[in-house]
């Protein structure tokens, strides 16, 4: 949920101040990296081969698998 909220805040920013907006977006993203849920999702993605060509080819299914395992 935090990631969705951060993404929405990034989208809602005007593009009048591009540099400031990009820095704010980077801050939003960095703020998510310390969360246990983020770490678990990244580990799960890598464990399922998400960084490989095969993982990229089945990205939709991979995302569903990760989401399903996160709700367990």
Image (tube, grey):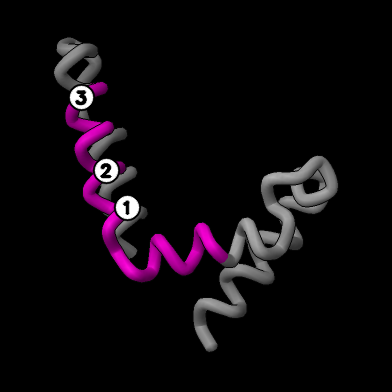
Labels 3 and 2: the sequence-earlier one: 3
Q: Quadrant of the N terminus?
A: bottom left
In this picture, which residue range is highlighted in magenta?
22-43
Q: Is residue 39 above or below residue 32?
A: below
Q: Which residue is mark 1?
A: 33
| Secondary structure category for the residue under label 2 | helix
In magenta segment, residue 57: no
Q: Which residue is mark 2?
A: 30
Q: Is residue 43 above or below residue 53?
A: below
Query: Residue sitting at 63 percent across and 57 percent down?
Result: 46
Query: Residue sitting at 73 percent across and 56 percent down?
Result: 49
Q: Is residue 25 left or right of residue 3?
A: left
C-alpha separation, residue under disc 3 versus residue under disc 2? 10 Å
Query: Residue sitting at 27 percent across and 43 percent down?
Result: 30
| Secondary structure category for the residue under label 1 | helix
In x, y percent, where is residue 44?
59, 66
Q: Which residue is mark 3?
A: 23
């Amino acid at each position: 949920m935090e990631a969705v909220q951060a993404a929405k805040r990034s989208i809602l920013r005007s593009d009048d101040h591009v540099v400031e907006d990009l820095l704010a977006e980077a801050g939003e993203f960095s703020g998510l990296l310390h969360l246990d849920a983020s770490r678990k999702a990244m580990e799960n993605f890598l464990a399922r081969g998400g960084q490989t060509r095969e993982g990229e080819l089945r990205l939709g299914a991979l995302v569903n698998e990760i989401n399903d395992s996160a709700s367990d």
